[in-house]
Image (tube, grey):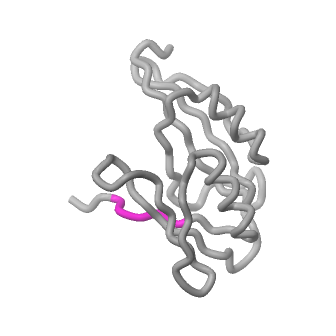
Amino acid sequence: MPRPIHFEIHAEDPERAMAFYAGLFGWKFEYYMADYWSVVTGEEGTPGINGGLVRRRGGAPAEGQPVSAFVCTLDVPSVDEYLEKVTAAGGKVAEPKMPIPGMAWLAYCLDTEGNLFGMFEEDPTAQ
């Protein structure tokens, strides 16, 4: 069965986007070619996937519009802690922390480029 193996972040200002994600999650960026950077999200052999960052070829997503792409959700140790980090880094909370009963806490944010992403904190007591 096919599984996701790569993601891409589109950015009007790649340097700003790289600073946001490096500061928030500690991701590393390596220039690859012609307005494209590889994104390393963790150590080899650990769960997760790596991706890319590309200069956006068009306008940024309009705020409040429906999502028209896959949304990546990241496993974090504390949604509350990372919501604070998102806003401190220049991002916005799109959907505040909510329970997925018996499983986890979930929140959605916008990065500095207007891209939506989720954050997921496992917690079987979430209600």
Q: Residue pushed farthest left?
A: 1
Say which quarter of the image contains residue 60. Answer: bottom right
Residue closer to the observer: 81 or 60: 81
Residue closer to the observer: 38 or 62: 38
The answer to whether 61 is drawn above or below residue 116 in the figure is below
Locate residue 64, reporting x and y percent: 75, 50
Q: Is residue 54 left or right of residue 46?
A: right
Q: Residue at x 53, y 22 (%)?
A: 99
Locate residue 74, reporting x and y percent: 49, 43
The answer to whether 58 is drawn above or below residue 21 in the figure is below
Q: Quadrant of the N terminus?
A: bottom left
| Count of numbered circles on the image | 0
Say which quarter of the image contains residue 68. Answer: bottom right
The answer to whether 102 is drawn above or below residue 48 in the figure is above
Q: Residue at x 58, y 69 (%)?
A: 53
Q: Is residue 7 magenta?
A: yes
Q: Residue at x 47, y 60 (%)?
A: 40
Locate residue 70, reporting x and y percent: 50, 57
Q: Residue at x 50, y 51 (%)?
A: 72
From the image, give the main secondary structure of the stretch colored magenta: loop
Locate residue 52, reporting x and y percent: 51, 68
Q: Is residue 48 magenta?
A: no
Q: Residue pushed farthest bottom?
A: 34
Q: Is residue 87 left or right of residue 4?
A: right
Q: Is residue 32 left or right of residue 4?
A: right
Magenta extent: 4-8
